[in-house]
Image: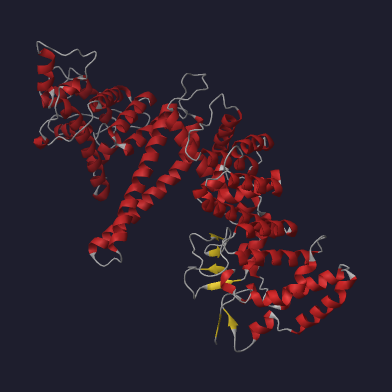
Amino acid sequence: MGNKKKPNGVVATIERLTGQTPCPEHLRSCLNKYLYVDGLFQGGRSRPPKELGRLEAGKTDALVLNVLSLDIVFAGDTQLVARILRGEVEGPELSESLTSAEGDLNRRYEAYGYWVLRMKQLRSVLLHEERPDLRTVRLHEYIKSPDPQTGVAHNSPFALRAVQQLERSEAKGRIGGASASDLVDQADAYFTLGDLARAATKAEEAIALEPQNAHAWFIRVMAALRLRNEALQHVQSYQIEADEIGLPLTGHEHWVAERRNEFLEIARRQDELLMEILPNALLNWPRAAPRSAAYEHGREWRLVRDQFIDAVFTKVCGCDFPHCYARNGLDAELQNVLAGRGSATRLIGNVSPSRDSPLNDKETAALRLMLDEWDNPLNQPLSRLDRNHHGRNFKLFHLRWALALGGEGAHWSRLNELLNGPGVNPLIEASPANPEVERLLVAHSVRNNGLDAHIAMLENGRNKAVNEYQATLDFKCLRQFGLLFHHFWVRREYKNCIEVAQRANDLATVKSGYLDCDRDGMDHPDHDGLWWPLRSRPYWQYLKVLATLGGMQAGVEGIDGSVLRDCEALMAEFEDVDVYSWRLGDVDEPEDLRIAPYRIDLRFPDFWLAAVRSYLDATPKPCELDELSGLESRLAALPREDDLFHNSDMRFAGLPQEGGVFQKSEN
């Protein structure tokens, strides 16, 4: 190893090359660590058994000076400096490393420059005979901003503290290797200076040394959130510019599109990273004291908690078809989707819908922690001041129910009490901001409270709404009725369907004419681009007839058969398909498809005939036998829907096996 008393020793070499005597300890420590690096100094070896490289006057002088210089520029990153010196870093990687180093040096320069440029003013204030009372007066009231032409950017007066912390930590790392605490200090300093990428890297290095370091996880998750949000802000900015430009025609316009896509990809990657970081951050969140239940950084904790709940909810209720239907209690909806699309085997092969949790162990543990906070509000209450907190509280309940984590009954009772207090149910009031929550609310409310209670809750909200809000709330209730009808229809609960359709009919206001896609309907929850005309009164009348006929075919007792007497008049009335049809595509375009609700076209005799025959088999009143038998004969004589489809001079748009598509065109 180098000997201080020899001309080629570490101390003697540094003193000779730098002119600094005695040799500064930080330079000695810096050179020593590079003497162990492979491929730099002859004989140096980093792997056991470690060997210290040799110094030779004249031969290694340039290498020594370059090592000491680059170690300063790249903030003590030994591996990067060694790779640069060995010629292993080139092109974009080297350019990116230099850009990062330059940014770090500029931040430090600006932090020092803030006070360098103000020292003269500070001197005059503190040495003045009539110095202000600094216990009551802010010092910065006497210190003006320097001339902007000085070249030093505006910075915080406290940024220098972060730089000093960073430099102390780096110095300790150079002497004996950075500890987890040193790396956290560096991460904290970089975070304060706004270098989020370096803050994240240092936090990761600290976590590698100490996996449960709370402050390291805190910095890591906050850096990831800010990096994601910055990328999304850039996406939004470039999207606005692209929208103003229109079609890409020039090089600049192509560049705008490329930059938008670049930041979109960055945001996507940060989202993926966040899903890995969020549960660990929550499980290792800094506490006010080692055994305290209270968290530090309460506002940030709520932010991270909300991000985690939203992310897990999306994962559990996401698009891993068909499992997302099964685990969320939507088995009947799944069967309806498969029936509408054709062969289930063609869609999903031999895959059976699974209720297994898509969460890993860390995500499940963090979710259980959130549930514990809900169950024990005195520990760490879910703040009632949080924006949209009702939506996230509902998501938390649904996750508990969907993943069978226990305690669902007590959770629902408490949540139901919060949601159904005085005034409008906040989840309904917030619709349609989160359609998935809106849909699952219907399922859980009906499952736990029953249809009558759910309708009573809607009526309670309507009765307390102010006049100017009444029309808006009526439409939100129509959305609920649309989801209720669909919920009961796919489960073949026809009496409930009839009740829902009648209630909705009383709220619907449009009897005929134009329907606006934004104000008058909603998208089908299971089919993108398929639209329900909820404000249309003929739509609800159609659904009521449809549910009545379905109930007859299913042999449901107590179904009123009087609708059959109006069969032929209703078939003619239903010829005006625009007022009640589902629509596929842009609903404002007249050439788009009009689809019969639930693909059952009541202009044709097929569904009517099946209902009449079922009703006749169910022992109707004697006075109805002759009338219904005659109706059966007349319906049987009418052209069937299949016959019309196979007619050579007419075809239906869309998939023929799905039926019920109104628009026709000539061959």
Residue 432 higher or lower than 212, as above or below: below
Residue 250 higher or lower than 189, as above or below: below
Q: Nearer the viewer, residue 402 or 461?
A: 461
For image coordinates 75% across by 58% down, the residue present is 495
Q: Is residue 360 visible?
A: no
Q: Nearer the viewer, residue 458 or 586?
A: 458
Q: Quadrant of the N terminus?
A: top left
Residue 69 higher or lower than 135, as above or below: below
Image location of residue 59, percent across then percent down: 15, 34
Most distant residue in the front direction = 467
Image location of residue 199, percent across then percent down: 34, 34
Q: Is residue 102 visible?
A: yes
Residue 58 vs residue 396: left or right? Answer: left
Q: Nearer the viewer, residue 511 or 201?
A: 511
Image location of residue 504, percent across then percent down: 63, 57
Residue 562 vs residue 329: left or right? Answer: right
Q: Quadrant of the C terminus?
A: bottom right
For image coordinates 20% across by 24% down, the residue present is 27
Image location of residue 328, percent across then percent down: 63, 49
Residue 235 vs residue 527: left or right? Answer: left
